[in-house]
Amino acid sequence: MSRRPLVLALAFAIAPMAAHAEDLLQTYELARAGDPQFSAAESSRLVTKEGSVQARAALLPQLNGSASITRTKNDSSGSQAFGSAIVPSEGTNDNTNKQYGVNLSQMVYDHSNITRLRSANLLSEASDYQVESAGDSLVTRTSAAYFNVLVQVETLAAAEASETALKKQFDFASKRLEVGLAPITDVHEARAQYDSARANTITVRNQVEDAYQALAEITGKPIERVKGLPEDFQPQLPASTGADQWVQMAMDNNPALKAKEYQVKSAEEDISTARAGHYPTLYLSGNYGSSRTDGSSSDTLTNLTTDFENRNDSRSLGLTLRVPIFAGGATQSGVRQALYTRDVRQDELEQQRRALERNTRNAYQVVVAGVSEVEARRLALVSARAAYEASQVGLEVGTRTVLDVLINQRNLFQAQQAYALSRYNFLQSRLNLEQAAGTLDVDDVQDINRLLTVDIAAIAPTNGAQ
């Protein structure tokens, strides 16, 4: 599968669509613009990339300039003896000194600066994969929240239908009690089931609201319209030959694993940086400076004032060789620390690789099993609805009790809930599998989105008990 940048491809896919119709693609577009987790990942990448710029700067010339101006005034007083006469004298010295200079330093050889740049570049590569992984995670997090809204809405529809049906059973049992055709226990059982259904509807209604809030937490904006699966949805297996091929794709393409691999390589370069503390360094330096002093001095003894001006220019060019001899063991400690850090990164990589293999295999099995599960849940729903309808007829002719109808009504509600959950879990597992394999692409999201054709307003009536 050709991998287009997911963010860019989604932007083009969203462009021709109406802004108010919030299907899965458009909901993801809102999430991409408003999700703080993804925004933090992008900012972290920018932070990491600045490390490369700073590491590269150490290899380039360092030019510094300086300038100063100083004014000095000295007053002196005293006396001098000329024979027997003592003559007082005073003197003043006033001068201004102006200096400026330029210093140039260029690394000729410093192995630590070279390895620091390599390490920073590798971390920069890792940050690119981390953002890609965050983008894939945003797709699955958004879809999970989106599908959870649909599951909760369908569950609420089933709960409300169950509550309505149980209310009818309670009324029916009460009328039968009035005419002496049913015992009081049937009324109590029907009332208990009806009250439980009312409480369950309240709970599910709160869960629907929370599901919408969870989706808004990701997108940053409230989502009012979503689209769900039609009744004739038929799950299909992805094109692949088996779990081993998916695992191999994951090992080759998963961005989170790639990021760990680059972090290990960066840690290897950090070892070289620490060992460079044993190596000599050579720097070229050049200086140019100019100093000018002017002023005047006076003496009351001679009544003379003297002006003066001095100028001094200096230029220097040299090489500085620094050879480390002994640093108190700090260099050896730094090497050991870098080695331990490399070991940590390698262990994290191995853990990531093992977890990725397990998760990919599990995701593939969930997708494969999901096809059969959806069909099994559909048949279970058909059977539960048939059993409920048959028990209603049996109650009317006297071959079934109210308790039988109540049990079948509860089974129908559970079957409706399980069927809705299995369908959307299958869609989510497809995206999870693509994410694990590192092949999640806008085409996968569009494929899922094309299946969601039923507006939310049309979902609720389809699940009621008839």
Image (spheres, helix red, strand yellow):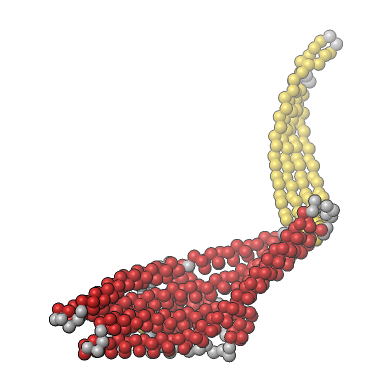
Q: Is residue 438 visible?
A: no
Residue at point 56% right, 64% down? 43
> Residue 100 appears at what percent x and percent y?
73, 45
Indicate the quadrant containing the N terminus: top left, top right, bottom left or bottom right: bottom right
Residue at point 58% right, 90% down? 241
Residue at point 80% right, 12% down? 86
Query: Which residue occupies the foreground of this view, 70 or 15?
Result: 15
Q: Quadrant of residue 83?
A: top right
- Above or below: residue 349 compared with residue 74: below
- Left or right of residue 27, residue 1 in this image: right
- Left or right of residue 187, residue 46 in this image: right
- Left or right of residue 445, residue 465 in this image: left
- Above or below: residue 279 compared with residue 133: above
Residue at point 31% right, 83% down? 408
Q: Quadrant of residue 378?
A: bottom left
> Residue 211 appears at what percent x and percent y?
39, 71
Query: Which residue occupies the foreground of this view, 129 or 405?
Result: 405
Query: Which residue occupies the foreground of this view, 117 or 361?
Result: 361
Q: Is residue 291 visible?
A: yes
> Residue 2 appears at what percent x and percent y?
58, 84
- Left or right of residue 136, residue 285 in this image: right
